[in-house]
Amino acid sequence: MSSSDSATRVVSGMRPTGRLHLGHYHGVLKNWVRLQYEFDCYFFVADWHALTTAYDNTGSITGHTFDVVVDWLAAGLNPGSSTIFVQSRVPEHAELHLLLSMITPLAWLERVPSYKDQQQKLGDKDLATYGFLGYPLLQAADILIYRAGHVPVGADQVAHVELTREVARRFNHIYGKEPGFEEMAEAAITKLGKKNARLYKESRRAYLEQGDAEALERARALLSGQQNLSIGDTERLYGYLEGGGRIILSEPHALVNEAARVPGLDGEKMSKSYNNTIQLREEPEVVEEKIRTMKTDPARARRKDPGNPDNCPVFALHQLYSSKDLLAWSSEGCRSASIGCLDCKKPLIDAVNAEQAQMRQRAAQFEDDPDLVNSILQEGSETARAVARETLEDVREAIGIA
Ligand code: TRP
Ligand code: SF4
């Protein structure tokens, strides 16, 4: 596969944090589930990333990896539609990370915002390691090894995708300038056939001389439809379009989730560390109890006190689950005190439990048969490795250590 496939590839990873909750579901997983039907998706558990912040606490990584994957499957990720695997089972990520580390300026890593932020926030952890500094570069390798075009991430990860783009650009700049590049690119153009060669040249000129972005897109589209070019020639022609050398690693784009902020039981953001979560695959009675005791608008201290749904975390959760009509009912009932909070919560409890019933049902077979999960991961890792090896071969060849 070449960089021409990258527009359709999606890659993303998640740390093995253990059982997932509704925050993960609405903020991340729902999006992944949708993407798997539109793109060629690679989703992995970033177990090496767990080491970058907790190398001395490794006892739960394997169990957490299992739980995370079962939650993915429960949420609707489908191993027939997306490639699901574990980072450490694709050692090619590590080799690319090593090679990229040679060309990455220290300053680029030191200025990634999460570097200093996390050192301040996680003061009790030892983050003065080489691994922690290099963590965004490991992420860059995770992405570039699949030549992914899109990376679904939260807003906090955008800087890492930006770094990934810079590293790819630098790599291409350093290693994409083979001797005789121009001649080879011109020779590749003739292989497009007369008509396409003219179109390519015209578009290239329009882009290079007038900055015509549409012309660039047209030429790229033309290249992505070419079946007969070698990988090398395709890379050359992509690079030549923009006036550079070969494009060996393609620059990905961040697909930022329109951050669904899922409120936790106490009204703060739902997060394991705040102990305010509703997990996926929770028992129905537990869901009911958690929502029954969930914080509401403090103005409604008594049943007859009117409230304001805008100040109520329950209502925020309602918005993720309920129809317009139901929302209008609870909003009006709240403002006029014609319903009580328990009345308001009842349909929400039912909706969350209906969603969870499906997840519990999907998860059951995997909980009963852990080998099933292992074989999904085994197969996913092999699929991923095949793609990763191709990229690495190109990378090694470009560097000159093939
Ligand atoms: N750093 C991400 C996080 O902490 C996880 C991650 C690792 C990732 N590698 C990635 C996300 C590659 C997207 C692409 O959430
Ligand atoms: Fe919140 Fe509903 Fe109670 Fe209003 S009635 S405070 S929206 S739970």
Image (cartoon, rainbow, N blue to C red):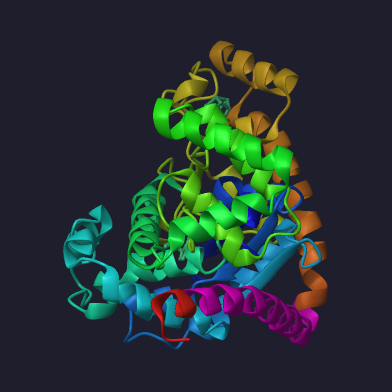
Does the stretch in magenta take in 365? no
Q: Quarter of the image containing the N terminus?
A: bottom right
Kindly tell me whether residue 314 is visible in this rendering.
Answer: no
Question: Which residue occupies the foreground of this view, 200 or 55?
Answer: 200
- Residue 390 within the magenta-colored segment of the rendering: yes
**Horizontally, is 75 left or right of 155 in the view?**
right
The magenta-colored residue range is 367-395
Question: Can residue 164 be seen by looking at this rendering?
Answer: yes
312 or 399, which is in the foreground? 399
Figure quadrant of residue 316: top right
Task: Give the main secondary structure of the magenta stretch.
Answer: helix
Q: Determine whether 303 is above or below 45 in the image.
A: above
When asked about the image quadrant of residue 109, the answer is: bottom left
Q: From what the image shows, is residue 89 above or below residue 101?
A: below
- Placement of 234 over or under 35, stated as above or below: below
Q: Is residue 381 left or right of residue 37?
A: left
Quadrant of the displayed image that contains ligand 2: top right
Q: Nearer the viewer, residue 389 or 400?
A: 400
Position in image of residue 319 (x %, y %): 61, 30
What's the residue at 68%, 35% (across, down)? 321
Q: Position of residue 288 (x, y in %)?
A: 66, 49
Q: How far across and how far down the image is residue 271, in percent?
A: 44, 55
Residue 139 at x, y = what percent?
42, 66
